[in-house]
Each structure stands twice: as structure tokens, then as C-alpha cells.
């Protein structure tokens, strides 16, 4: 068979369902071979969106999402989404065409050294310089992407190699397993927990990746220890669980800081430092830390590890819980209680533009607990991360390591493909929306009904918030928007504009029930950002 065919067989062998991408001149053979495959190709309108789709598909399914581009500009367009997946530890395999090996050594049309360009944003970056190595390279790319901590891999496929004849078969797929935690470390951790006065858990996205949420909740319950979660670990412990404290991660003081202030021992489980820097929650550097993860802790002056357990996260939690003694006492649940109060306070708010708290209330009310929200990056993300209640992991997808704008719309499309039985909402700022809004066409063409909820303020809201806090004035953050309703309609989608706050629940209900793409332009009152800063600035922790 042709090398391109073997390559596609290898992708099938890895269980690939979708490839997101754009065809090009240098991947003609692969595109042709895909026609005879069970794999569905999702043609997109920008390669960055293809990479974000693969990224979110990987987060939701725990299997590598696959994206494909041509060489040169197609490949460089993939970079942002690939970096996003890699930094947020989502499994992804990116594929790019390349010029024939006969012209890689010289100045040549659209030729860039792609494997080097992708090296810093992947765990493995390689070129298929010979057809014989295809089974090994594909197997290795998927294995590396799936090995903890998960991340991205990149394969470049020169066009002349894709066209060669080869007689080979895919290699058998074996999933890497995490080792058992060391017994001595389990005992040490259990002793530290038993003798601590106020232990607290910081749960990160590694718990989601390890499917260890149940073990985490069980651990917290058995030992009666409160749990804060990072933005990306929302839902890892149900919000209504008596041990749940809420999300930590705002770069300013937040109610949850009171929990960290009070703790003498912080048990970090599946915590990625990239998401929430330890200097923000551990400025004093004087607390004991237990690190439970797939891999050893990153070195950081604010993250001094007393005991480190590496290996299977769920098993580590189970083993420690068997040995540690239960803590007495009631948890202070500062963030959780205050958020509930704050939400209740705004549920019937009629002020216009709509307050962030009210948008979140209406959205939470309109959605089923297992529906999926894909959040973009901006002030809206801060509000969503703090206030949107999640009872299940992976129901509010947030890019918080690389934190790239533009993920929500393509991410929602991928979420709908990965979980067709669930409703999917992209929550986005107006700026982030316009970064990948061309993918509305993809969603319409592929008949993927998603709701896009735009928090519109005609500004780079988060940056305006920071500029005002720091300098008391804004610099170059304002812009104007197209008419989002007409914009939606120009794609054949449905557009709504929220003119009165009271209309939002009805609009959300209609949009979620619709069998098409719906775009909701919801003016947001970001004066609440400054109120929040003030409120948190004068925060006094309960004793
Ligand atoms: C691709 C990318 N460019 C720039 C930034 C820096 N940045 C973070 S938030 C933000 C503003 C986002 O504005 P918008 O999408 O309207 O959301 P809002 O903050 O108004 O809710 C910017 C420019 C980023 N994170 N990612």
C-alpha cells in the first residue's frame, strides 16, 4: 500500500474518530487515503481552530485529539492550539504535510523546519523521513501524548514519503499504566495528615485526567478534609459536597485564600503549577506540602514538598486514607458560602447591562448538570471559574495553563462531536469570539447545534480591569463589534440580542432547545469587576 494509507491505518489502529484540519497541497495523499477510512475528517476554516478542537476533544475523551494541516503557514497556524494542549496537559497529535525530502535542505517554497518549531510546544516532534518508520512513529506519538503528564506530539509527513509504497502494519496499542505509590511514602503522608492541625487539599486537573474524582471525594470525606480545586479541576469534587471549598485561582486575594492562610498542611493532588502559581497561595513558604501526582513535583521555591507520592493518583489517595486518621471539626467554607449568598443575591437582578453573577445564575439554571460549557479567556473566565457551580468534572472546560483566547467556539464544536448527547455552550468575550468565529460555518455545515454566549462589552475586558487596577486609566482596549445577530444570520445560524435582563432565561432556553447554532449577544456590566476587586481588597478572613 501507499505510505499515506499505512499512516491512516495506524491512526485507525489508535482509535482515532476525527481528524480536524485543512487539506493542502503537501498532504494530498493523506487526504485521499482518509476517504477510505472510518475516520471522519472535519474540515475547518482556520488551523488554529483545528488544534483547539483536538485539544478539547482530548480533554473530554482522554484520548488524543488529532489535527492536520499543510506545511509552512498551515502548520504555524496550528501552533497556538498545540501549545495550549501541551501546557494544559491535554493529549493531542498534530500532523503537518511537508515538502518532499529532496528540497528540505535549501531555500524552498513554504518550507520551514517544522519539527524544530514544534519542539518547544510538544513532548515529541518528529519527521516521517522513511515509510518504514510510520508504525513506530504513530505509536510513539500517541503513547507519548497519553503518558502522564499528557500533552502534544507532532508528526511531519513529507509528500514524497507519503506517496511511497510500503508493506507494513500498525503496531499493537498498549496503554501506559501508572505505577503503584511507594508504601513508605504512603505511611509518611498518612502520618503528616494525622498530625496536622488544619490540613487542606488543593486538587488540580491531574485528578480529572486520572479519572480519580471519586477517590478524591472519598478521601476528603473519610478524613474530613476540605478541598479547594483549581479552575481546570472544577467539578472534581461536587460543589454541593460538604468538603468542597470552591475554586482557587484568582490572581488576587479571594475568600478561598482564607482557607490557605489557615492550613498548616496542603495536600496537592494532580496539581499543575502552570495553572495557579504557588507564590499566590503560599507566599509564606512555611506550610508543609504533600505532593500526590503521576510525576515528581516541579521545583519551585514556594512549593517545598515534605512528602511526594508519584504514581497512580486514585490508588495513592485510597492507600493514604486507609492509614491516616480522621480530622475532627467543621470546615470553614468561606468561598463556597459567600458565593452561594452572592448568587442568591443576584438571581432576580434586573439591572442592565446584565451582571456577570446573573448571567452565570441563568446559565447554570438553564443547563443540565452534565451539559458542557467551554469557557474562553478573559474577565468572563474569572467569573465563570469562581462562580459557575460544577457537580461533575469536565463540565466546564477552561484553558488555564496557556490561557489562550479563541478556544471556546472551536472547543464547543469538538465537545459536541465528542459528547453528542449533551448540550454545549461556548461562553466567550466579544474579543475571543471574533478570534475564531469563522468556525460557526463549520458547526453549521456539520450540523452541530451549539450555543455561543457572548459577554459583550466592546473591550478587552480583563485587560481593562487590570489596567484600571494598576494605573487608573485604560490603554487601547476598546473596539466596536459587528451586529452579532446579523452576523449569526449570515451563516444561517440564529442570533439573539439580550435587550432586557429578564429576557436572558427565555433566550437561553430557546437557544438550548434549538437544533441549530445559536449566538447570544449579551451585554455585560463589567463595573462588577471593579466592585469585586474592592470587595476582595477589604477581605477579612473569619477566625
Ligand atoms: C490569544 C491571546 N491573546 C491575548 C491574550 C491576553 N488577554 C487575556 S484576556 C484578554 C481580553 C479578552 O477580552 P474578551 O474576549 O472580550 O473577554 P472579556 O475579558 O471582555 O471578558 C486578552 C487580550 C490571551 N490570553 N490570548
Image (cartoon, helix red, strand yellow):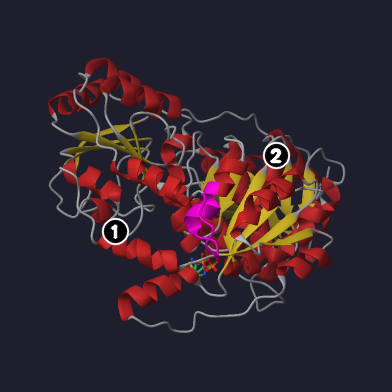
| Of residues 135 and 246, the one drawn nearer to the viewer in this rendering | 246
Q: Nearer the viewer, mark 1 or mark 2?
A: 1
Residue 173 drawn above or below residue 540: above
Image quarter (top left, top right, bottom left or bottom right) of the N terminus: top right
Q: Is residue 33 left or right of residue 58?
A: right
On the image, the x and y values in percent for residue 344 come to 44, 45
Cα gap from disc 1 to disc 2, whole angstroms: 46 Å
Examine the rendered structure and indicate whether residue 328 appears above or below residue 359: above
- For the C terminus, give its image quadrant: top left
Residue at mark 2? 16
Asked if residue 128 is positioned above or below residue 320 in the image, the reply reads: below
Total numbered circles: 2
Q: In which quarter of the image is residue 308?
A: top left
The disc placed on residue 536 is 1
Instruction: Bin the neighbour count of mark 1 within 10 Å (Cα to Cα): few under 14, some 14-19, many 20 and up.
Output: some
For the point 67% across and 56% down, the residue is 452
Answer left or right for 331 relative to 209: left
Q: Does the stretch in magenta take in 488?
A: no
Query: Relative to 198, is 122 above or below?
Result: below
Q: Where is residue 178 in the image (x, y as percent from the top left)?
A: 43, 29
**Res. 480 visible in picture:** yes
Q: Callout 2: 10 Å neighbours few (<14), some, many (20+)?
A: some
Give the mark, 1 or 2, whose residue is nearer the N terminus.
2
Provide the secondary structure element on which disc 2 rests: loop
Where residue 45 appears, x then y in whole percent?
A: 75, 63
Q: Residue 365 carries which label?
A: none
Q: What element carries label 1?
A: helix
Magenta-tinted stretch: 348-361
- Image coords of residue 152 (percent x, y): 54, 50
Q: In this view, does 86 lie to the left or right of 520?
A: left
Callout 1 touching callout 2 (CB < 8 Å) = no
Amino acid at each position: 500500500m501507499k505510505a499515506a494509507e499505512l499512516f491512516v491505518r495506524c491512526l485507525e489502529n489508535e482509535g482515532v474518530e476525527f481528524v480536524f484540519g485543512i487539506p493542502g497541497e503537501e498532504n494530498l495523499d493523506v487526504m485521499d487515503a482518509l476517504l477510505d477510512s472510518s475516520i471522519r475528517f472535519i474540515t475547518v476554516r482556520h488551523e488554529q481552530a483545528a488544534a483547539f478542537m483536538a485539544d478539547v476533544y482530548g480533554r473530554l475523551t482522554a484520548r488524543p485529539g488529532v489535527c492536520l494541516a499543510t506545511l509552512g503557514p498551515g502548520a504555524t497556524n496550528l501552533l497556538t492550539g498545540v501549545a495550549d494542549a501541551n501546557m494544559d496537559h491535554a493529549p493531542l497529535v498534530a500532523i503537518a504535510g511537508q515538502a518532499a525530502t529532496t528540497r528540505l535542505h535549501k531555500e524552498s517554497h513554504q518550507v520551514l523546519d517544522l519539527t524544530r518549531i514544534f519542539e518547544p510546544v510538544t513532548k515529541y516532534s518528529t519527521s516521517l523521513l522513511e515509510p518504514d518508520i510510520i508504525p513506530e512513529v504513530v505509536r510513539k506519538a500517541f503513547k507519548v501524548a497519553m503518558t502522564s503528564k499528557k500533552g502534544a506530539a507532532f508528526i511531519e509527513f513529507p509528500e514524497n514519503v507519503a506517496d511511497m509504497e510500503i508493506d507494513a502494519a500498525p503496531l499493537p496499542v498498549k496503554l501506559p499504566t501508572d505505577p503503584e505509590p511507594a508504601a513508605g511514602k504512603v505511611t509518611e503522608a498518612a502520618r503528616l495528615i494525622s498530625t496536622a492541625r488544619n490540613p487542606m487539599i488543593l486538587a488540580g486537573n491531574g485528578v480529572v485526567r486520572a479519572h480519580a474524582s471519586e477517590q478524591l471525594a472519598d478521601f476528603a470525606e473519610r478524613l474530613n478534609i476540605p478541598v479547594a480545586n483549581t479552575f481546570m479541576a472544577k467539578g472534581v469534587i461536587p460543589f454541593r459536597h460538604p468538603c468542597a471549598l470552591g475554586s482557587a485561582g484568582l490572581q488576587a486575594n479571594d475568600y478561598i485564600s482564607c482557607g490557605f492562610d489557615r492550613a498548616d498542611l496542603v495536600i496537592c493532588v494532580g496539581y499543575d503549577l502552570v495553572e495557579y502559581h504557588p507564590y499566590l497561595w503560599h507566599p509564606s513558604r512555611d506550610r508543609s506540602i504533600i505532593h500526590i501526582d503521576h510525576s515528581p513535583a516541579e521545583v519551585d521555591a514556594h512549593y517545598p514538598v515534605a512528602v511526594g507520592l508519584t504514581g497512580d493518583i486514585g490508588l495513592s489517595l485510597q492507600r493514604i486514607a486507609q492509614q491516616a486518621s480522621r480530622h475532627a471539626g467543621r470546615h470553614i467554607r468561606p468561598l463556597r458560602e459567600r458565593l452561594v449568598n452572592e448568587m442568591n443575591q443576584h438571581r432576580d437582578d434586573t439591572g442592565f447591562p446584565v451582571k456577570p453573577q446573573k448571567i452565570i445564575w441563568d446559565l447554570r439554571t438553564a443547563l443540565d448538570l452534565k451539559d458542557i460549557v467551554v469557557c474562553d479567556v478573559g474577565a468572563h473566565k474569572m467569573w465563570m471559574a469562581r462562580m459557575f457551580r460544577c457537580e461533575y468534572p469536565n463540565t466546564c472546560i477552561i484553558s488555564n495553563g496557556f490561557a489562550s483566547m479563541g478556544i471556546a467556539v472551536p472547543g464547543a464544536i469538538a465537545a459536541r462531536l465528542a459528547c453528542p448527547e449533551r448540550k454545549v455552550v461556548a461562553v466567550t468575550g466579544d474579543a475571543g469570539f471574533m478570534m475564531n468565529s469563522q468556525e460557526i460555518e463549520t458547526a453549521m455545515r456539520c450540523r452541530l447545534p451549539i450555543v455561543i454566549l457572548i459577554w459583550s462589552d466592546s473591550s478587552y475586558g480583563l485587560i481593562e480591569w487590570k489596567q484600571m487596577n494598576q494605573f487608573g486609566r485604560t490603554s487601547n482596549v476598546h473596539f466596536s463589534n459587528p451586529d452579532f445577530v446579523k452576523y449569526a444570520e449570515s451563516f444561517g445560524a440564529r442570533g439573539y440580542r439580550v435587550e432586557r435582563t429578564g429576557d436572558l432565561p427565555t433566550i437561553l432556553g430557546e437557544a438550548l432547545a434549538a437544533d441549530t447554532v445559536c449566538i447570544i449577544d449579551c451585554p455585560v456590566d463589567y463595573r462588577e469587576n471593579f466592585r469585586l476587586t474592592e470587595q476582595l481588597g477589604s477581605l477579612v478572613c473569619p477566625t
